[in-house]
Image: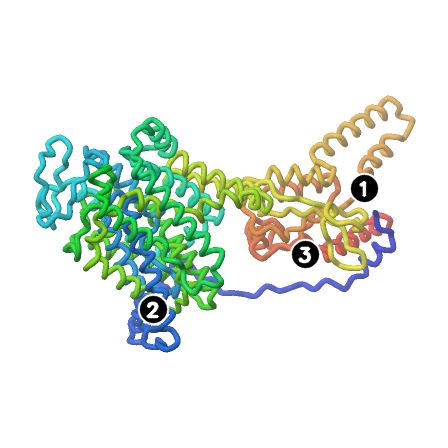
Amino acid sequence: MDTSSLQDMEAAKSPPMISLERKARPKKGPAEIFKTKLRRQLSCSVPKVKSTLTDFFPVVLWLPKYKIKEYGWGDLMSGLIVGIILVPQAIAYCLLAGLEPIYGLYTSFFGNIIYFILGTSRHVSVGIFSLMSLMVGQVVDREVYLAGFDLSDESKQSSLDSEWNITEDYSKTAINLTIKAFSMECGKECYAISIATALTFLAGVYQVLMAVFRMGFVSVYLSAPMLDGFATGASCTILTVQVKYLLGLKIPRHQGYGTVVVTWINIFKNIHNTNFCDMITSAICVAVLVGGKELQERYKNRLKMPLPTELVVVAVATIVSHFADLNGHYSSSISGAIPTGFIPPQVPNFELMPRLAVDAIPLAVISFAFTVSLSEMFAKKNGYTVRPNQEMLAIGFCNIIPSFFHCFTTSAALAKTMVKDSTGCQTQVSSVVSAFVVLLVLLFLAPFFYSLQKCVLACIIIVSLRGALRKFRDFPRLWRLSKIDAIVWMVTMSSVALISVEIGLLIGVVFSMICVVAQTQYPKVSLLGQIENTNHYEDMGDYNNLLSISKVKIFRFQAPLYYANKDFFLKSLYKAIGLEPFLEITRRRKLEKKAKERAAKKPDEDNGDVSIGLIANELDFHTIILDCSSMSFIDTTGITTLKGLLKEYKEVGINVILACCNTKVIDSLRRGSFFGSNDKEMYTMSFHTVHSAVSFAIDDAAASVNASSV
């Protein structure tokens, strides 16, 4: 309802407006800022050197203060449990990476040791991760295929024999590489690990460069729905490429787009070749693994430690496969020989890196995004802080240094981190314990996994995807919470699963950014009314019992004003106000013309001036107040739009003033001369509150009426 004249008088009697004076802050030029930062970075002193070293090696700060009695037992138990879980997963995930099992053990060992020295999180478990293994495997298989090698499992030649030599004739399928550490012809498996280490080295270099140049902001563009969709889509791909092992089918991994669709088509085409021994083993292992996970979740409050289901399954399956000779009698695929000890380190092949430079970018981004987000999540949960930039450095060196020791890309893993947190982990000493467990396997126990069936490893991988695949069940809830987030999740998941992991990631990032832009391009707009007996104003479309101010329209635009939404701003303003100035000007000109023609026909009747005077008095308001409280910035196009708006409404006798502008918007308007020369009209065109703008509009209109009456 409209306010009475009494309310207008009360608004006019508001306390006098106080003009705030901006602080004078000295502005430094870009050159001066650069010199200051450079001087600060290049300055050298003993305290700064000490601070730099302790920042780079956080372990030297907390390890001397380690409380053995308080932390020792929790770190020991969590380290042992994670190590027990880590060993079968490290072997299994090599199926995804297209590499020999020994490399997964190397990756898990070195990742834990290096993060112990460089990391700032107390709980994150760094090592082999399914998504990273999948992305590495796709690049490895592509390059191996382009090199002319056969991708089928039967063609695998172990590169781990004592002489590192290949005796078969690869005249048609082999590629000769000059590798300084080998100086001999490189076979398929040797070439595969050369690709993986070069890719890992590049990913680590990217991550270190991102940390050096403070480019952690890149992770800001990886929204939570997008990352969840990416993980779920990648899990669908992982599930698909592992099904062939469950059924014992000999199908090479598809190269190119549409891996999920093409692989399922090939599976059904070759379903008659199913190995029933592998299929039965897979069914039993999946049932045991899922049953163990369900028991773990149901009785997690009663169990003092997670059930080592994977280790039990691997141990029992290996024993059964060995004594029943499943490989000899039923042609069941097995892991094969896993040598003990460490292979001599070698420099990653720099000749391969130009071909892998682009492939390493998504690996680097996803790896550090998961690591930083998990670090911050568990730090917040346990009441301490981490340094994101140091986390990027840590994960970068967790890739660079291990790449010299035949390792592939690492990242923080959610499942193992949750296990560490739930089993009493206090510090990264638990990572050293886990690395020690892996070391025992590397030095003594690796040969015992010779008879382990690949279908058992595939079962471990598939069951580990339960968390990501359960996101499908959460989709209705996400849709109710935010339809835009749900659409981002669905688009990213579908793109990753149906096209490829890399293209899906790119589509997800671009689409989520488009959604953000779309929300600012078409924001919510509203007319405001006064809350009774207060100086506050709210949306008249959302609240009842608001008072509309007589002769004043208050318009709120809830977004920045820039080139992409300036047309929507104008259209929504015209629609809300009910007056488009250009059309009003045209209408008045037509009426003036008709009045003049009528006066010309009847010169004796003095009606022309009366008609023209009535034209200007038909409007029911005299001021438009733009509430800019939600306007975070304004660009040059937005300034030009406001200038044009001011001019057009002025021609029809309507004043436009601003309220609640932040200093950034005011500075932009001042630079654009919006307030006139020397900002002389600033204090009559911009106000700190909506109420002060309303009071000014009423006072100004009353003063104009008094002046005209005199």
**x%, y% of residue 523?**
61, 43
Task: State whether residue 206 appears in this view.
Answer: no
State the SS at label 3.
Answer: strand
Q: Is residue 219 left or right of residue 64?
A: right
Contact? badges 1 and 2 (CB < 8 Å): no
Observer-nearest residue: 530 or 682? 530
Mark 1 lies on residue: 620
Residues at marks 2 and 3, CA–CA distance in whole angstroms: 63 Å
For disc 2, the neighbor class at 10 Å (few under 14, some 14 to 19, many from 20) is many
For disc 3, the neighbor class at 10 Å (few under 14, some 14 to 19, many from 20) is many
Observer-nearest residue: 353 or 680? 353
Observer-nearest residue: 317 or 115? 317
**x%, y% of residue 541?**
73, 45
The tag earlier along the polypeptide, 1 or 3, is 1
Mark 2 lies on residue: 76
Q: Amino acid at mark 1?
A: Asp
Mark 3 lies on residue: 687
Task: State whether residue 162 appears in this view.
Answer: yes
State the SS at label 2.
Answer: helix
Q: Amino acid at mark 3?
A: Phe
For disc 1, the neighbor class at 10 Å (few under 14, some 14 to 19, many from 20) is few
Mark 1 or mark 2, whichever is nearer to me:
2
At horizontal 85% and vertical 24% (from top left) the residue drawn is 598
**x%, y% of residue 572?**
66, 39
Q: Residue furthest top?
A: 601
Quadrant hosting residue 115? bottom left
